[in-house]
Each structure stands twice: as C-alpha cells, then as structure tokens.
Image: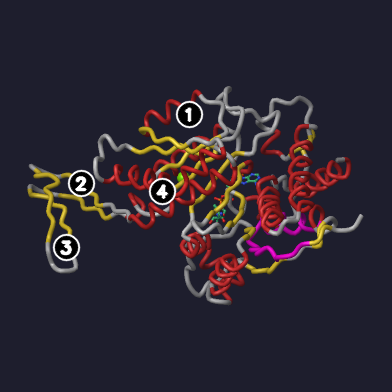
C-alpha cells in the first residue's frame, strides 16, 4: 500500500521520560508504516531545553504559529529536584505555559469514552469537553494576611493619576484579603476560542459564572461572551443548528449531571481547574483524556492531558516491565493529523486518523488494555499488556479495519 502523502509539516514537540519512549513506539508502529510523515521536529526534552536555554520551546511555539498545527509529548516542568537530577542551568519555565502565552490560547479537554470503561455518571453517553480560561483570577492574585484592626480599600490609579476607591472591609481584628484581576483582551480571546471550537467540533456551548453575586467582575465575562457571540458568531451558530447559552455556575453544575453530554462547557480559570478534574475522574483516568490548545486565530496544539509518567519511567530504567497507557498520546497525534488533513484537503489523512482512533478503542473493547484500565473496566477476562505490546495490539487491530 502506498503511504499517505502530506503537504504541510506538523510541528512535532518531543518530550520527556515514559511519554518520550511511547512517542517513538507510536511513530514506528502506528504512523511511519502508513504515512509519509512530514514533521518539523523540536526536541522539548529537558536536556535539550537546558542546552538551548529554552530557546527550543520558543522556536517550537513560533513554528506552531507559522504552520498552524502542532502535536506535543508530555514534558517535565522543572522543580528543585529536577535541577539536581538534570544539572540544570536554570529552573526553566513550564513549556506548556510558554506555548500557551505565545498562542494566547484556551485549553479544551475531553474524556475518551470507550465501552467497558463507563463514566460514574450513568447518563453521560457522549464526552463533555471542558474549556478552561487559562489567565488571571485567583491564579494571579495578591494576598494580605491582616493582623489587626484597620480599613481595606480597593484603589485603581489611572495613568493620569486619578484614583477610584472602594472600601472592601473595615476590620475589627485579624483577617485576610485577596486582590484578583482579568483583562477584556484575555476574556475576548477566551470567548472567541470557545465559539470557534464549538463551530469546529459542531457542539453546543455553555458558559457559566456567578454574575448574580459578582455584579461587575463575573458580569463582565458574561457581557463580553454575549457581545462576541452577537457580533461575530450568532449567524454561524444558527446556520449550524448550534446553541450558545449562559447560565449561573451552580445551575450549570446541576444541569451537567442530568445531561447525556456532547457539549462544550466553558469555565472561568478556577471553575475549569476544579470541574475538569471532576469530569476526568468521573470518566476513569487522566490517561483517557485529550487536550488541545486553540488560539483565537485558529492555531491548534494537541497533547495528552497527563504528565511524563515519571514513576513508570524509573521502572523502565531499572529494566522492569511497564504497562503505560498510550491512548491519550495516540489521540494527540490523530487530532493533529486530522486537523492537518482538513486544512490541507487531504481526506485520506483525516480518514486514517479516524481509523487509528477506532483501532485503539476496538483493541480495548476486545479486552486488550494496559493495567490502569484493567483495574477499572467492567469487561471480564481482560488481557493486561505491557506498554509496547499494547501499541502492537493496536497495530494488529488497525490491519484488520
Ligand atoms: P503524571 O505523569 O500525570 O502521572 C501521575 C500518575 O498517574 C502516574 O504515576 C500513574 O499512576 C498515572 N498515570 C498518568 N498517566 C498515565 C498513563 N499514560 N498510563 C498509566 N498511568 C498513568 O504526573 P507526575 O508523575 O506527577 O508528573 C511527572 C512529570 O510530568 C512532572 O515532571 C510534571 O512536571 C510533568 N507534567 C507534564 C504535563 C504536560 O506536559 N502536559 C502535565 C502534567 C505533568 P501509577 O503510578 O499509580 O501507575
Ligand atoms: Mg487541577
């Protein structure tokens, strides 16, 4: 069989530890035999990031802007222990943070659902995609621990020196204070990314905040979403038969439990942090969760939601067998290949991505899976495979489709 030809390269961001090992096996077994794979390769492994003073991460983000689609392997975010382990020159920033800042994107996460791994919420038949705003609020806060009586005020000093003041509270004794912010620009980008992604994936969009209590802060989010919708997306939504609606966050939580899924739930930064962990753990495992960063200009970066699976990597280095789940990493590749196929009008490439996803899910449904899934599946008599043999089993299924 002739290999599928590509036109534009994918930006390939290699990574660290166990996921770096899976990355190579996935390419060798599931991609290179079928596709004349064109990639522009960036090694985001910690050693090379250190060698290039992290320039490679910045270059990979720029390349993503240039070509439009990237696929990323999980990477180490250095901490004190990694400084010694890798003899680092500096505690380099999180590559995901650098890439997110460069692309000004929103992260969409959705569980990969498969027969035999049922969500705890029985009526969730289709995946719920969480869209998390990744800027500001409590993640960029300023806090004060108040130790005595006194008056707390919120003060904004304009460029021309004029002050706007609001009394926050007059303290009779010890207490706490917190200052948070967001910007119209970031909220607008977030809204655009959500609306574009909803159109792209043909799903309804929900957005929720607590605007009844936060009449300026949260209300501003609600207003910006509505304005962006009315001026730029309403027509396209109506044409596609899709719905956008806004509701209160507590109402959204209650409704989500009663739906059958299949929509996008846009959340403010903190709500998204908490709710994406709820959705993913209700659906089984982080290893069954896709993640894509979408910029307001329509640039896509696909990855797995989990980390480098350090514990398994150390076992691997010790010569022990590992059973690491490669599904989310495979789906990062299929997401990127499908998008490249759409943009470059190569239907065979998008069809191959669909087929590879189907083969992956069928392998699990046929009872062949990694240990993490074997522990939670409702299927009987399953075969637990090691990291490599699971990928080989997917290839065998792929050959039969
Ligand atoms: P992790 O890699 O997500 O793994 C945590 C645990 O979850 C594993 O020990 C394993 O549990 C289970 N797990 C996660 N993925 C799995 C998979 N594919 N198959 C089977 N089990 C899986 O998080 P971590 O070990 O705390 O972090 C390791 C490194 O990843 C850190 O340096 C962190 O900075 C980095 N990280 C990167 C990203 C990213 O690049 N997007 C995201 C998060 C973390 P058991 O050990 O019980 O089997
Ligand atoms: Mg979290």
Question: In the image, is residue 315 part of the stretch drawn in magenta?
Answer: no
First reached walking from the N terminus: tag 2 or tag 4: 2
Name the residue that disc number 4 marks: 231
C-beta proximity under 8 Å, tags 4 and 3: no
For the magenta stretch, what is the residue range? 6-28
Res 176 label: 2
Which of 219/249 is in front?
Answer: 219
Residue 31 percent across, percent down from the top left = 79, 55
Q: Going 80% across and 32% down the picture, which residue do you hit? A: 366
First reached walking from the N terminus: tag 1 or tag 4: 4
| In this rendering, position of residue 372 left or right of residue 87 | right
Q: CA distance from mark 4 to mark 3?
A: 32 Å
Name the residue that disc number 1 marks: 256
Where, quadrant-wise, is the N terminus in this rendering?
A: bottom right
Name the residue that disc number 3 marks: 157
Q: Going 56% across and 26% down the picture, which residue do you hit? A: 260
Residue 93 percent across, percent down from the top left = 48, 65
Q: CA distance from mark 3 to mark 1?
A: 41 Å
């Amino acid at each position: 069989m002739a290999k599928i030809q590509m036109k534009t390269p994918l930006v390939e961001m290699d990574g660290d530890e166990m996921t770096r090992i899976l990355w190579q096996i996935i390419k060798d077994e599931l991609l290179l035999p079928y596709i004349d794979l064109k990639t522009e390769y960036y090694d985001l492994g910690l050693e090379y990031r250190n060698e290039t003073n992290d320039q490679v991460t910045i270059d990979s983000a720029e390349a993503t802007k240039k070509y439009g689609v990237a696929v990323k392997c999980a990477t180490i975010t250095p901490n004190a222990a990694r400084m010694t382990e890798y003899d680092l020159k500096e505690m380099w920033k999180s590559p995901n943070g650098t890439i997110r800042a460069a692309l000004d994107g929103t992260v969409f996460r959705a569980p990969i659902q498969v027969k035999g791994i049922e969500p705890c919420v029985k009526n969730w038949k289709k995946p719920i995609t969480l869209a998390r705003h990744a800027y500001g609020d409590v993640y960029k806060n300023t806090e004060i621990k108040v130790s005595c009586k006194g008056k707390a005020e919120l003060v904004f000093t304009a460029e021309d020196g004029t002050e706007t003041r609001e009394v926050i509270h007059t303290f009779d004794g010890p207490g706490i204070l917190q200052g948070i912010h967001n910007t119209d620009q970031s909220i607008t980008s977030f809204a655009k990314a959500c609306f574009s992604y909803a159109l792209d994936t043909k799903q309804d969009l929900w957005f929720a905040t607590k605007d009844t209590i936060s009449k300026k802060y949260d209300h501003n989010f609600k207003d910006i979403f509505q304005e962006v919708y009315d001026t730029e997306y309403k027509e396209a939504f109506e044409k596609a038969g899709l719905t956008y609606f806004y509701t209160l966050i507590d109402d959204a939580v209650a409704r989500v439990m009663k739906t059958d899924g299949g929509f996008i739930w846009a959340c403010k930064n903190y709500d998204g942090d908490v709710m994406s962990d709820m959705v993913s753990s209700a659906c089984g495992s982080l290893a069954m969760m896709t993640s894509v960063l979408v910029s307001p200009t329509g640039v896509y970066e696909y990855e797995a939601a989990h980390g480098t699976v350090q514990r398994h990597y150390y076992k691997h280095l010790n010569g022990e067998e590992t059973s690491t789940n490669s599904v989310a990493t495979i789906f990062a590749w299929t997401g990127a290949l499908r998008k490249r196929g759409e943009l470059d009008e190569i239907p065979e490439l998008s069809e191959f991505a669909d087929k590879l996803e189907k083969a992956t899910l069928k392998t699990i449904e046929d009872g062949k899976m990694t240990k993490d899934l074997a522990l939670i599946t409702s299927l009987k008599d399953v075969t637990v495979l090691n990291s490599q043999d699971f990928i080989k089993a997917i290839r065998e299924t792929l050959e039969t489709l």
